[in-house]
Image (spheres, rainbow, N blue to C red):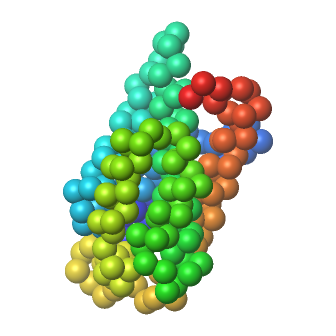
Amino acid sequence: MAPFLESSFADVPITDAGVDTLAFLEASEGLARLFDLLGSAAFSVVQSDLRGNIELIENEKGEKKRTATEGLMWLLRGLSFTCKGLQNAQNNKSEDLSTAFRRGYDVTLKKYHNFIVQGVFSVAMNACPHRVDFYNKLAADPAGGASMPEDKLNEELNKWLSSLEHIVTRVEAFYEKGGYSKGL
């Protein structure tokens, strides 16, 4: 199974009280590893940003500044971007990954970025591997065993994406209701 699917958002406990933070962060770290499969240094900026936001959230305790609040907001935005890009790829099997991720970027992160950062993301989108190469890497067994069959990969990936979307939507609603996203 692809390493990033091992810490699945489907396994993150969700209750009326909220989302299990540790399990959520572990699944988010798994998502950051997904960018290794895209095989381009252009994605190191995205991966580094996700990991930096995870560290902010884990390390902030009792601070008066809103560093973790902002870090979580940007982590959610990054997760939403990744989710939308992969959902686009899953929903349109003939679409190039660069197009799928560009459409995901347009509806998630673009409005928060200035033209310089938008340029960095444009370069990253152009560096996406061919769709078949990416999906082959997703299906590959890291231990060298047989690759996951395409139908099983699609089933697992869709489950993972659905769970991720549910968590992001829930935490975004929490931010909106509490006014925590204002100014971020």
Q: Position of residue 159 (x, y in %)?
A: 59, 70
Residue at figure coordinates x 26%, y 56% from the top left: 42
Residue at figure coordinates x 77%, y 42% from the top left: 16
Please, is residue 109 above or below residue 176 in the view? below
Q: Quadrant of the N terminus?
A: bottom left
Q: Position of residue 100 (x, y in %)?
A: 49, 70
Q: How many marks?
A: 0
Q: Quadrant of residue 69?
A: top right
| Residue 84 visible from this viewpoint | yes
Q: Residue furthest front?
A: 115
Please, is residue 75 above or below residue 60 in the view? below
Q: Quadrant of residue 144?
A: bottom left
Residue at figure coordinates x 56%, y 44% from the top left: 111
Q: Position of residue 168 (x, y in %)?
A: 62, 49
Q: Quadrant of residue 18?
A: top right
| Residue 160 visible from this viewpoint | no
Depth check: give the residue in front, 8 or 174: 174
Q: Quadrant of the C terminus?
A: top right
Viewed as shown, does residue 41 lie left or right of 169? left
Residue at figure coordinates x 50%, y 13% from the top left: 65
Please, is residue 43 above or below residue 183 in the view? below
Viewed as shown, does residue 170 lie left or right of 153? right
Depth check: give the residue in front, 120 or 108: 120
Q: Position of residue 12 (x, y in %)?
A: 58, 52
